[in-house]
Amino acid sequence: MTLRLGDIAPDFEQDSTEGRIRFHEWAGDNWVVLFSHPKNFTPVCTTELGAVAKLKPEFDRRNVKVIGLSVDPVSEHGRWAADIEETQGAALNFPLIADPDRTVSDLYGMIHPNASDTLTVRSVFVIDPQKKVRLILTYPAATGRNFDEILRAVDSLQLTDGYSVATPADWEQGEDVIIAPSLSDEQARERFPQGWKTLKPYLRVTPQPNR
């Protein structure tokens, strides 16, 4: 199955470190970051899970639930969690799905046969409260992810959902944004009374509207 942006994230029921998960029910009205790991007891995965555990308050502040996945059974997840806390200085504080039958991996297209027939790649799915897939990232097994970038992308998605703006390259929370080209200058004056700077007719820069 190939998931594309705007698709409804597939529902599933699977065991996890926090019990049986019915995904859509568990997600509720929250944003979700679902991210997969090639295998338990691997070095890069261990650092990633520790990094997300440390950042969980930032995800919580954005109304984002985080959930990990690995193809190993839940009994192995428990043993791995002890290693994560010991080596990364942060205890696992979000569910880690057990996917030994590859049910979720196949639903979300996390197995890339040319990379590995059995292990998931490092996939990231950002899912909105309507259960739509809003962002997909895929990393090779040896490359750890930058979760600050995932937080930045969530900030952009949440901001641009609420206002007729887009975020430029390297944008960070609080920086100027771009007025959507679909808005006329007259419409923009109503929505952005603080004004804007016109660099080109299609490139109008204005202060972030929700600050």
Image: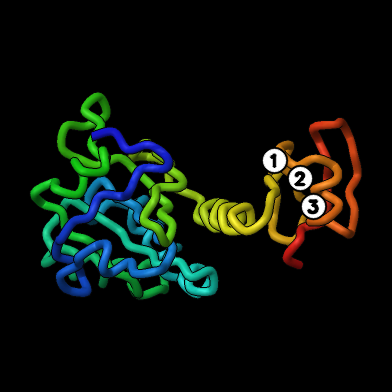
The answer to which image quadrant residue 87 occupies is bottom left
Closer mark to the observer between disc 1 and disc 2: 2
The local secondary structure at tag 1 comes to loop
Q: How far apart are the two marked residues, 3 and 2, measured between alpha carbons? A: 10 Å
Residue 108 percent coordinates (x, y): 26, 43
In the image, taking residue 159 as reference, residue 197 lies left or right, namely right
Q: Quadrant of residue 66?
A: bottom left
Instruction: Name the residue that disc number 2 marks.
Output: 179
Judging depth in this view, the residue of 203 and 164 nearest the camera is 164
Of the residues shown, which amino acid type is indicated by label 2? Ile
User: Looking at the image, which residue is at 15% across and 61% down?
Assistant: 14
Quote the CA–CA distance across marks 1 and 2: 14 Å
Could you tell me which residue is drawn at 35 percent across and 55 percent down?
34
C-alpha separation, residue under disc 3 versus residue under disc 1: 11 Å
Q: SS for tag 3?
A: loop
Amino acid type at mark 1: Ala
Residue assigned mark 1: 169
Classify 10 Å Cα crowding around label 2: few (below 14), some (14-19), many (20 and above): many
Numbered disc in front, either 3 or 1? 3
Residue 107 vertical position relative to residue 78 in the rendered view, above or below: above
Q: Which residue is mark 3?
A: 176
Indicate how the structure is coloured in the image. Answer: rainbow
Image position of 32 (left or right of 185): left
The one of 99 and 44 positioned closer to us in this rendering: 99
Q: Residues within 10 Å of mark 1 (few under 14, many from 20)?
A: few
Residue 155 falls in image quadrant: bottom right
Secondary structure at badge 2 equals: strand
Q: Is residue 157 above or below residue 74?
A: above
Circle nearer the N terminus (1, 2): 1
Tell me residue 12's x, y (percent): 18, 56
